[in-house]
Image (cartoon, grey):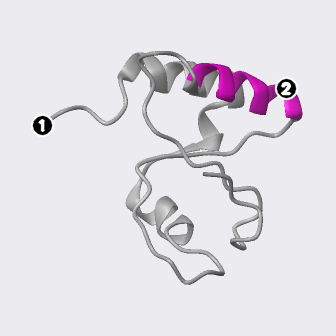
Amino acid sequence: MEELISSAHLRELESIVGRENVLSTPEDLVCYGYDATHCEGEPSLVVRPGSAGEVAEIVRLANRPERRDYLPLTDNEGTGSII
């Protein structure tokens, strides 16, 4: 099975936002699997930036050629998502 996110990529995310703001356990992810549109999904990882600078760094990382798909969610209400 292909790795969803490399350990190096995960470490980079943790260095940007701090380990406590990178969520990957099922109990942490369950509340991020739906929004106000009533669409459901299963996120592999949730990254919670605390500043515009952290968002910019995450977007730079996500736009690298080896990146994985990502879905920014701004308010967990379904009204601020960007695909």
Query: Nearest the camera: 8 or 76?
Result: 76
Q: Which residue is mark 1?
A: 1
Q: Quadrant of the rendered structure where residue 56 is? A: top right
Q: Secondary structure at mark 1?
A: loop
Q: Which mark is residue 27?
A: none
Q: Residue at x 61, y 81 (%)?
A: 37
Amino acid bearing label 1? Met
Between 7 and 35, the residue placed more toward the observer is 35
**Residue 32, how many percent across, how many down?**
55, 65
Residue 22 is drawn in which quadrant?
top right
* Residue 56 on the magenta span: yes
Residue 26 image position (x, y, % from top left): 39, 61
Main secondary structure found in the magenta portion:
helix
Residue 53 percent across, percent down from the top left: 85, 26
Name the kind of residue labelled 2 in the image: Gly
Tell me the tag on residue 53: 2
Circle 1 packing at 10 Å, graded few (<14), some (14-19), many (20+), is few
Q: In the rendered image, which quarter is residue 40 located in?
A: bottom left
Q: Height in image: 62 above or below 51? A: above
Question: Considering only vertical position in the picture, is 1 above or below 54?
Answer: below
- Marks 1/2 in contact by CB < 8 Å: the verdict is no
- The structure residue drawn at horizontal position 69% and vertical position 67%, both measured from the top left corner, is 76
* Residue ranking furthest to the left: 1
Q: Residue at x 44, y 65 (%)?
A: 27
The residue segment tinted magenta is 52-61
* Vertical arrangement, residue 68 with respect to residue 25, above or below: above
34 and 17: which one is in front?
34
Which residue does the image show at 25% across and 32% down from the upper left? 3
31 inside magenta stretch: no
Spatial CA distance of label 1 from label 2 is: 34 Å
